[in-house]
Amino acid sequence: MEINVENILRKSFLSKEELILLLGSTGEEKKQVFELAQQVKAEGVGKKVYFRGLIEYSNLCSKNCFYCGIRSGNPRYARYRMTDKEVMEAVDFAYESRYASLVVQAGEQSGKAYVDHIESILKKIHQKTNGELHVTLSLGEQSEETFRRWFEAGAHRYLLRIEVSNPALYSRLHPMDRHHSYAKRLEALEMLRKTGYQVGTGVMIGLPYQTLSDLADDLLFFHDFDVDMVGMGPYIEHQDTPLYQYRDQLLPLKERFDLSLKMVALLRILMKDINIAATTAMQTIDPQGREKALMAGANVIMPNLTPVKYREDYLLYENKPCIDEEAAECRGCLEARIFMAGDEIAYGEWGDSAHYKKRTRNYDQK
Ligand code: 5AD
Ligand code: SF4
Ligand code: FES
């Protein structure tokens, strides 16, 4: 069958079959996909890039995902939790640098003491920054009550990647127990939406057993769930994980990167007004990975604020960049990179997605 990419791209909605074709596009057709994504980005979200200072709060995790370097079954990393003082230093840096927004990320932990502690940190951040610094949490699956408490303590957004939207593939990438259930993950995403958060999710690209049909379904999942934000990037093997045994069956790194860029571009075409992150994993494969993701349609970057002494112990995958760079170095580096991509940093702006603003009323914009 002859495919006419131009005709497909002119349509207002892309079907699964069309997405599969476009994910497999090369040469001139691929170029057309990226051109359209750029155009849609310019019209939908413009040139502004929003910073989210990233605090990798703790590498303690109760889960054992087969792909992740900090899984509980990996004894290699010293487990840490940042002190409140260290968290507040990172908060000060973000506030003074006018980042306007923070992401607090950690492995999945639970228990009353932990939930209380996160709540107290959220209140401290709110107090110290007069509620001006917005906080995104990325702390895994929690109960509805915990989600609500953290929301009421000042968290605005929550990131919980579905990882893969195909339940059968999900069960091949996680231990088969009730702690790693696709149904529970989906339920958690629904609870987050109900609680009032701006909801972000995402997937890994280029996993063993993953097909273009799975990736097309991932894009449609984001669309059908009507998410506000997406962070996705290439899967990168880690030698201390069970999935490492499939390393010979993976797409070459360059192709995984290319496919990830196409996913960003097609998502931008499909969802014109959401926030899409140019993820660190993109830069792990290509030194200009994040700039290329911006040019393909992304509009959010997460500069790392984690104290350097912990960075070696937060390696979800191998060759993660910025292991030795202090927060101020990453800020300078990213300023130059974003400038090169032709975009501008929206300092001092929360950068809530236009999508979120549209789907909620009484929105108080900064
Ligand atoms: N390669 C790429 N991304 C990974 N993540 C975990 N392990 C890997 C890996 N090996 C991603 C997961 C998780 C996020 C915090 O990091 O998608 O949700
Ligand atoms: Fe824990 Fe997240 Fe890694 Fe899974 S992906 S082991 S939940 S940190
Ligand atoms: Fe950290 Fe470039 S973003 S050094």
Image (cartoon, helix red, strand yellow):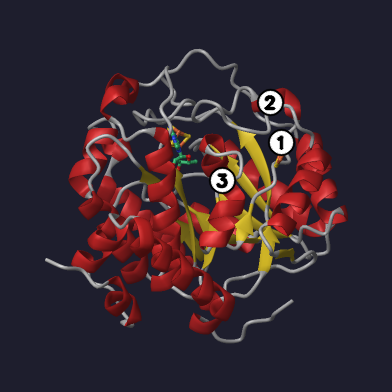
Left or right: 121 in relation to 281: right
Distance of label 3 from label 1 (alpha carbons)? 21 Å
- Mark 3 surroundings: few (<14), some (14-19) or many (≥20) residues within 10 A: many
- Percent coordinates x, y for residue 305 in the rendering: 73, 41
**Which residue ends up furthest to the front in the rendered image?**
28
Q: Which residue is mark 1?
A: 306
Decide: marks 2, 1 in contact (CB < 8 A)? yes
Query: Which residue is drawn at the image coordinates 47% and 25% (left, top)?
Result: 69
Residue 75: x %, y % from top left: 48, 13
Pointer 3 with pointer 2, Cβ within 8 A: no
Of residues 98 and 206, the one drawn nearer to the viewer in this rendering: 206
Q: Which residue is mark 3?
A: 289
Mark 2 is on which residue type?
Answer: Tyr
Q: Which residue is mark 2?
A: 310
Q: Residues within 10 Å of mark 1 (few under 14, many from 20)?
A: many
Q: Nearer the viewer, mark 3 or mark 1?
A: 3
Crowding at label 2, few (<14), some or many (≥20) Cα neighbours within 10 Å?
many
Q: For the N terminus, which image quadrant?
A: bottom left
Q: Position of residue 47 (x, y in %)?
A: 66, 70
Question: Ligand 1 shows up in which quadrant of the image?
Answer: top left
Assign a secondary structure to mark 2.
helix
Mark 1 is on which residue type? Thr
Ligand 3 within 8 angstroms of badge 1 C-beta? no
Front disc: 3 or 2: 3
Q: Quadrant of residue 186?
A: bottom left
Q: Is residue 251 left or right of residue 193?
A: left
Query: Residue flagged by tag 3: what amino acid is it?
Result: Gly
Q: Is residue 62 above or below residue 100?
A: above
